[in-house]
Image: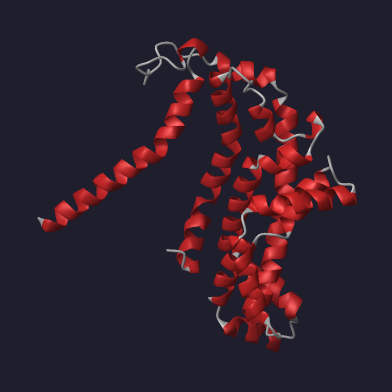
Amino acid sequence: MKKVLDYGLTYMLLIFFAVISLFPFYWMLITSLKDRKRAFVYPPEWIPDQILLSNFSKVWNKIDFATYMSNTLFVTVILVAGQLMFCAMAAYGFSRMTFPGRDFIFVLLLGSMMIPQIVTMIPLYILMKSLGWIDTYKALIIPGMFGNAFGVFMLRQFFLGVPKEFEDAARIDGAGIVRTFVTIILPMAKSALVTLGVLTFVQSWNNFQWPLIIINSPEKQVISVALASLQGQFTADMTGMMAGALITLAPILIIFIVAQKYFVQSIQMSGFK
């Protein structure tokens, strides 16, 4: 009986937190299907009387979604590829190689996670300006490819769990460091790499502040900034913004659903419990 009560209480708590987590998405969905005048009625309409799918076509035509989505996808794909490559190389060095000051440098790297992003934004903007990269994709992509201390930490934790015997066997077969890293370590770290890729994808796709500061040309802008343009100084097209947010959310949901299996595997194997 006690076991049944424990299971029941556990499921009730899980359902409670699941409902709380999903409520913002539900509110976004029903707002995107309402008439603009009924978005803020009180008491709120939990189920719209009239479902308007036209909000999606309106917001699609109001801003150039295709251009902004393709810009965002271009920046995000390169950022994900760059972070996976550089984080994996750095994590392999910190986990498998010995050199003077390795642990101290790693602690310094972890310490950089404590620095708020807003603190580095002004020096980074001045650096981009001195390089002549303002209003270019280089300013959006290159600084983000090297600065993910969390990615290095996560992959290092995974690499530390790979048995040394695999590397010893590779060395006996004549493999060097690069070949061992590419053909032995990286294939075994597929779940951790996919997890880091998903996290980087979400972060880059939703990035708003840096593109807003560094990109001036509307045709080069990303979707997060373009979506914010629907909000005026005194009025906001809330139904259009919610419809646009749902369209923008679709690639992230697809990526997460496809990679969910590797995401769970990585958490279990890396010790992030």
- In the image, is residue 54 above or below residue 96? above
Q: Is residue 125 left or right of residue 254?
A: right
State whether residue 261 appears in this view: yes
Q: Position of residue 74 (x, y in %)?
A: 75, 42
Residue found 60% across the figure and 68% down from its top: 110
Image quarter of the N terminus: bottom left
Could you tell me which residue is drawn at 46 percent across and 68 percent down? 271
Taking the view exactly as shown, the residue that stands out farthest to the left is: 1
Residue 180 quadrant? bottom right
Image position, residue 231 (x, y; %): 62, 23
Task: Mark yes or no: residue 184 visible.
Answer: no
Q: Residue at x 51, y 21 (%)?
A: 32
Where is residue 269 drawn, in percent x and y?
48, 67
Give the answer, above or below, for where 218 lies relative to 81.
Answer: above
Q: In the figure, residue 81 lies in which quadrant? A: bottom right
The C terminus lies in which quarter of the figure? bottom left
Q: Is residue 177 left or right of residue 25?
A: right
Whole-percent x, y for residue 123 in the image: 76, 53
